[in-house]
Amino acid sequence: MTDPKKPRAAERRGFRVAMESALVWRLRQWFGLRLYGIYARDLGGAIADFSPALVGYSHRIFEAPDAEILQALAGAPTLDMSESFMKSAFGKGDACDAVIFAGKLVSYSWMAFTPTRDSGSVFVEFGPRYRYVYKAFTLPEFRGRHAIRQFKVDSDQYCVQRGRVATIAFISIDNQPSIRYALGVGNRRIGHAGYLKFGSVFFSFRTPGVKRAGFRFFERRLG
């Protein structure tokens, strides 16, 4: 027998999520206020909710000497990876964590080890124990397969070799799909952080757990 309370509970949850999303959007658009959950996971261990191997996929981590190879793979506009972006990322020591299928780049993210631009003049800083993952992208036709997940152990080991013991990321508090994914691969929320940027005004904030991780948003005036 179907429990009539379950549909009503699901409706209430859906309504609450919709209201939270609308509020976060208005705070961001009207006042320049951004609110994030900060998530971290130790590197080198087993990946939670591990996906079975997918046939035909391969994995490669690209560093600065591999720039020409990556550029050839990422030339399609649909991949949203310009030559100038690659030059800047490789120039600061970042690496590209890439999944390839049938000789085609289908999914990637960038791994940073130094402060990294978030948007405009706002940057992200994090402690020396951490690697920070940003600019993740998967071609629409490959989404939902979680191909990158089966190679996370390899990318984790690469970062351990570079002296990092954990990964850290921020996710907008209304981005439920990304939050579920982060928790599904073993991340835990260590607190919240965000910033207010309105015209020339900039103010950042973070909770104690985030501060202990050395994570913060800051503004760097660009010349």
Image (cartoon, rainbow, N blue to C red):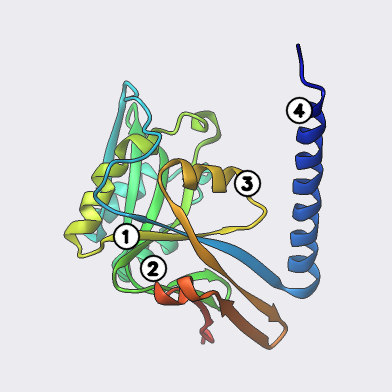
Q: Residues within 10 Å of mark 2 (few under 14, many from 20)?
A: few
Closer to viewer: mark 2 or mark 1: 1
Question: Does the residue at mark 2 contact the one at mark 3 (Cβ under 8 Å)?
Answer: no
Find out whether the residues at labels 4 and 2 contact each other: C-beta distance under 8 Å. no
Expressed as whole percent of the image width and height from the top left, the position of residue 145 reads 46, 29
Q: Nearer the viewer, residue 38 or 147?
A: 38
Q: Tags 2 and 1 in contact by the CB under 8 Å rule?
A: no
Marks 3/1: CA distance?
A: 23 Å
Judge left or right: residue 103 versus residue 119.
Answer: left
Residue contact between numbered discs 4 and 3, judged by CB atoms under 8 Å: no
SS at mark 3 in the image: helix
**Figure check: 211 above or below 77:** below
SS at mark 2 in the image: helix
The first of marks 2 and 1 along the sequence is 2
Disc 2 designates what residue? 88
Indicate the amino acid at tag 4: Lys
Give the amino acid type for the residue marked by disc 1 in the picture. Answer: Ala
Percent across and percent down for residue 45 are 26, 46
Q: Which label number is shown at residue 6?
A: 4
Position of the N terminus by quadrant: top right
Nearest the eye: 6 or 203: 6
Residue in the picture at 70% in, 72% down: 33
Question: Is any atom of residue 214 visible in this view?
Answer: no
Q: Which residue, given by chain and number where applicable, does mark 1 sit on? A: 166
Up/down of 19 relative to 58, above or below: below
Q: Residue at x 78, y 47 (%)?
A: 16
Q: Which residue is mark 3?
A: 176
Pointer 4 or 3: first along the chain: 4
Amino acid under label 2?
A: Ser
